[in-house]
Amino acid sequence: MSKNKAIIDDGCNPKLVAGAKFDLPLGIPIIKAPARITIPPGITPFSMRNRAPSTNEAIGFCEMDVNFSEVLRTPEAYIDDFGRFAAMISPDCSLYRDAPLSVQLTNIYRNRAIGGYYQRRGQYVIPQIRWGNEYTYTTKYFPQKVAFLGAEKHSILAIGTYGCISSREDKYYFEAGLEAMMDTLEPLVVLVYGAMPDKVFGQYLDYAKFINYPNWTKRMHGGVI
């Protein structure tokens, strides 16, 4: 009698974290800080990677999740593809503030699990930091600020502002999360994809090196690529 393998057997794809170290007690996989910080000259979205001006660029994921859904499902299929580039930023899985907290935690886990997966295969990986509602960037619910688990202190990280500071409410949550991130991770370098208004970032410029990258549409419109 043949045995059928249930699709659910693989759960959250545990092979992704084989050999990983974890931030406990939640078990968020850790993307290790690089031995040497390298700042990419540009960030190209995943969906535009075949139009990247140079393989010295970092591949980023600040776009709709559906555009990089295959990376989440079959990350092993992209090892060679991403290996062409000098760096990649861990997948920017959406953390909607009104999503259940369990979903937000799952997307933090997937960000670090997939980023760490590529890092252990030789890719230079920069953790993308994203937060949702206040439960992810404060200790109101958990004893740790879960949005920052799996990223090491005093290193390089990436954030995105594209679509995140449009409304007054969005700006409030972004500024609150940014303050918590700076206090918790104390980064040396922060890559910012999208607008970087001084009113939001000015107070932190003496504490870390901020590198601003225009979004892809602005680069095209401005004739940069």
Image (cartoon, rainbow, N blue to C red):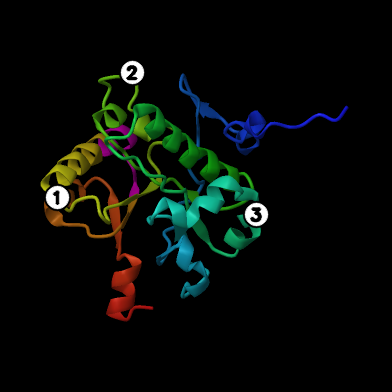
Q: Position of residue 39 (x, y in %)?
A: 41, 59
**Residue ID at (24%, 50%):** 164
| CA gap, disc 3 and disc 1 | 38 Å
Amino acid at the residue labelled 2: Pro
What SS does tag 3 mark? helix
**Residue ID at (28%, 71%):** 218
- Judge the density around disc 2: few (<14), some (14-19), many (≥20) Cα neighbours within 10 Å: few
**Residue ID at (58%, 53%):** 123
What SS does tag 1 mark? loop
- Identify residue for label 3: 77
Labels 1 and 2: the sequence-earlier one: 2
Image mark count = 3
What SS does tag 2 mark? loop
Q: Position of residue 46 (x, y in %)?
A: 47, 61
Task: Examine the rendering and report whether any part of residue 15 can be seen.
Answer: yes
Asked if residue 31 lies in the magenta stretch, the reply is no
- Identify residue for label 2: 143
- Judge the density around disc 3: few (<14), some (14-19), many (≥20) Cα neighbours within 10 Å: few
- Residues under numbered marks 3 and 2 in contact, where contact means CB atoms less than 8 Å apart: no
Amino acid at the residue labelled 3: Ala
Q: In the image, which residues are magenta?
A: 181-189
Asked if residue 184 lies in the magenta stretch, the reply is yes
State which quadrant residue 145 falls in. top left
Q: Position of residue 224 (x, y in %)?
A: 34, 78
| CA gap, disc 1 and disc 2 | 30 Å
Amino acid at the residue labelled 1: Ser
Nearer the observer, disc 1 or disc 2?
Answer: 1
| CA gap, disc 3 and disc 2 | 37 Å
- Identify residue for label 1: 167
The foreground one among 3 and 73 is 3
